[in-house]
Amino acid sequence: MNTIPIRTTVVGSYPLPGWLEFAFQNLDNFGRADIEEMIEDAVIVAVHDQTAAGLDVITDGEQTRLDFNLSFYGYINGIEQNDTETRKFGPPAHDQRGRNNIVGDLIAPNGLGVVKEFLRLKKLAPEGPTLKASIPGPYTLSGRLLPNEKYKDRYAITEALLGAGCTEITVDEPSMSCYAYKEDTKRFAGIFNRTVKPVVGKCNLSTHLCFGNFKGHSVGYRSIKPMLPDFLDLDVNEIHIEMANREFAEIELLKPFAEKMNIAVGIIDVKNYYIETVDDVVERIQRCLKYIPAEKLSVAPDCGLSQTARWASKQKLINMVRGAKKVRESL
Ligand SMILES: [Zn+2]
């Protein structure tokens, strides 16, 4: 149960301001203090847009996670960047993401930096909204690490990362939803539950499941069916699932989830520059309410907003909150 019916939330990322992207391409020109100041300014921007929209739950917009050294991979020992395997030209897509060779034991001796990010958000955010920290789970993180002699496949890498401290408040596993159709979903649930075990019951624990959004493209088989029934055993308070971009296909399959946990439904399409109107939002929420009670329902964009231009992200969030309020008031 949520404290607020039809709670308005986000997945995690927010578009980086143009100046920050430019600065990330020229990091050598900046000192450590400059970088810290820049990151704070960027978080202030993300917090501002989210609180101005009136969201119940906000994040730091993941404003630090662009550059390799500042991303999760920068915190993991035993890897080095490998861009030789990626496609360099042609339309932008997942196969152009840089990957990493494993050159030693996979360990993250100082964690993955999320606690520091969360403390920064706490310092900068106003009173009111709930503050959320998001972190990719081990299976999703393993996707950009190349197997080697010691870590022979993605599962072996996942097992190694699991021991490296991937245990945070919100654990995102979009790779699990993308590949549920061809992988062992029982094994997925097992990996997930072992990852989150130390925090179960200690926080509002959620996971984000989508079908890919790198450069605005999907990458998985976009169906909820393969996730059932094993994903019902995920040890979380809430699952978030992409729906808007799939025109709410299989919405009835959210019912068994709603019997076990809260559901955050993606009602804003982050891949489409059509801006959902307040009335669109109202209509979509009403469709969700047929299968999920209002106290168990949160609404969010389909995925993080990092791949959607800021002007569009801003307006989409504003309309989402207005629509949710309208339905809430009519309950
Ligand atoms: Zn996503």
Image (spheres, grey):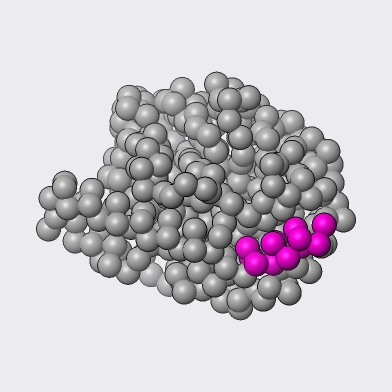
Q: Left or right: where does residue 81 sit relative to residue 191?
A: left
Q: Which residues are magenta?
A: 320-331
Q: Quadrant of the N terminus?
A: top right
Position above or below: 304 against 120: below
Number of numbered discs overlaid on the protein picture: 0
Q: Specify the principal SS of the magenta part.
A: helix
Position above or below: 264 against 46: above
Q: Quadrant of the C terminus?
A: bottom right
Image location (x, y in percent) of residue 117: 37, 41
Image location (x, y in percent) of residue 289: 83, 55
Name which residue lies at 44% across and 36% down.
Answer: 147
- Which quadrant holds residue 201? top right
Q: As rendered, which of 148 and 260 lies closer to the eye? A: 260
Q: As rendered, which of 247 and 283 lies closer to the eye? A: 283
Q: Left or right: where does residue 17 sit relative to residue 205?
A: left
Name which residue lies at 83% across and 38% down.
Answer: 259
Check residue 230 for magenta coloring: no
Image location (x, y in percent) of residue 123: 36, 43
Q: Left or right: where does residue 289 sit relative to residue 109?
A: right
Image location (x, y in percent) of residue 321: 63, 63
Q: As rendered, which of 105 and 45 lies closer to the eye? A: 45
Name which residue lies at 19% across and 56% down.
Answer: 27
Q: Is residue 73 visible to us here?
A: no
Position above or below: 130 against 6: above
- Which quadrant holds residue 277? bottom right
Q: Is residue 202 visible to us here?
A: yes
Q: As rendered, which of 62 and 153 lies closer to the eye? A: 62
